[in-house]
Image (cartoon, grey):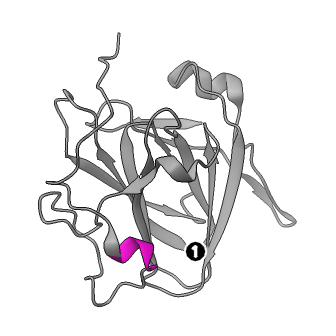
Amino acid sequence: MIVEEFPIQGLYAFTPKKFGDDRGFFSETFNGKAFAEVVPDVTFVQDNHSLSRDVGVLRGLHFQTPPHAQGKLVRVTRGRVLDVAVDLRKGSPTYGQHASVELSADNWKQLWVPPGFAHGFCTLEPDTEFLYKVTDYYAPECDSGIAFDDPDLGIDWPFSRSEAILSGKDTELQSFRDFVSPFTYEEKA
């Protein structure tokens, strides 16, 4: 497994090995022991799978607040997305900064988004399937988000608000400026 670090502490991309022949391929997409060597003390409790039929579907920027904050290990099994994580941890030297990475069925990358980050993605191909493992169950009372196109975040999405296909919920998310973070930065030892 190839592991890439980002300039924002805590974010990692993992690319599992794929072994193929004329029959197809095999890949160990998750190994708890190998993952724990990079990201210790994480337990996944649920797997989620979404399908976005059209190019330009934009989901995010979402997160859950404590006591049900979620870490996510995300990947694409069909299609392609631009995936974005924004640091929401008070006291972090990268607070309010983001990282983006293309995830696709072809590049086989996965992104670890720890608790304390907002997460979103937009589809770059039709019929994109997005899978993610999460560290806590969905808790509607802790569900929150920030507007994907907030100018203070400066994310270079490939679609504007008028072009993106958004849910009703995602059209009404708060601004970053109005957000009061419940997350605290803990420096890596």
Q: Nearer the viewer, residue 68 or 134?
A: 68
Q: Where is residue 9 in the image (x, y as percent from the top left)?
A: 31, 30
Is any atom of residue 123 visible in this view?
A: no
Q: Nearer the viewer, residue 66 or 124?
A: 66
Question: Residue at 29% of width from left, 67% of height from top?
Answer: 148
Q: Where is residue 68 in the image (x, y as percent from the top left)?
A: 53, 37
Q: How many marks?
A: 1
Residue found farthest to the right? 23
Few, some or many residues within 10 Å of mark 1 (<14, 14–19, 20+):
many
Is any atom of residue 85 visible in this view?
A: yes
Q: In this view, does 11 lie to the left or right of 129?
A: left
Image quarter where the N terminus lies is top right
Q: Where is residue 152 in the image (x, y as percent from the top left)?
A: 12, 58
Task: Look at the image and say whether residue 126 sits in the magenta stretch.
Answer: no
Residue found farthest to the top? 189
Q: Which of 40 and 162 is in front in this view?
A: 162
Q: What range of the chain is rendered magenta?
A: 167-171
Q: Is residue 173 left or right of residue 30?
A: left
Q: Name the residue under label 1.
A: 79
Question: Residue at 64% of width from left, 25% of height from top?
Answer: 34
Question: Residue at 50% of width from left, 32% of height from top?
Answer: 67
Q: As shown in the figure, which amino acid type bears the numbered disc 1?
A: Gly
Indicate whether 92 appears above or below 178: above
